[in-house]
Amino acid sequence: MCMQLQAAIAKIQREAAGWPTDALRAYIHGSLDVLADRLAALDIAQFTGSAGAGDDGCVSCGVLFAALVTALYVRELTYRPAEQPARVGFSLN
């Protein structure tokens, strides 16, 4: 199991390294929305007791996977150099 997780992490990191920064940012925003939705579903299922034993595990797994992918993509962004704003020159001549 641990080797499978390491292989999955390595694959996600390779894919993230090849994506443009804007695409990574967009994916992270989407992943955070999905993560929030899954956490809300998990809270509702636990509060109402409406989830079966298998459903709870699936939602929990989905939350963990979404969090892992988002964290790895955020990590990839931190390794990239910061974008420099465009400089505008001004002269009185």
Image: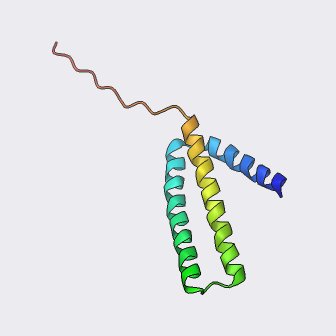
How far from the left and from the top, in percent, is residue 56? Answer: 66, 77
Residue most toward the top?
A: 93
Q: Is residue 48 left or right of residue 87?
A: right
Q: Nearer the viewer, residue 83 or 38?
A: 38
Q: Is residue 32 above or below residue 40?
A: above
Residue most toward the left?
A: 92
How far from the left and from the top, in percent, is residue 7? Answer: 79, 50
How far from the left and from the top, in percent, is residue 47? Answer: 54, 81
Q: Residue at x 55, y 38 (%)?
A: 78
Q: Nearer the viewer, residue 66 or 24?
A: 66
Coloring basis for residues: rainbow
Name which quarter of the figure residue 58 lies in.
bottom right
Q: Quadrant of the C terminus?
A: top left
Q: Residue at x 49, y 46 (%)?
A: 22
Q: Is residue 35 above or below residue 53?
A: above
Q: Is residue 12 left or right of residue 86?
A: right
How far from the left and from the top, in percent, is residue 13? Answer: 68, 45
Q: Residue at x 63, y 41 (%)?
A: 17
Q: Quadrant of the N terminus?
A: bottom right
Name which quarter of the figure residue 42 lies in.
bottom right
Q: Residue at x 64, y 73 (%)?
A: 59
Instruction: Please tell me how many numbered marks the rendered image carries.
Output: 0
Q: Is residue 12 above or below residue 45?
A: above
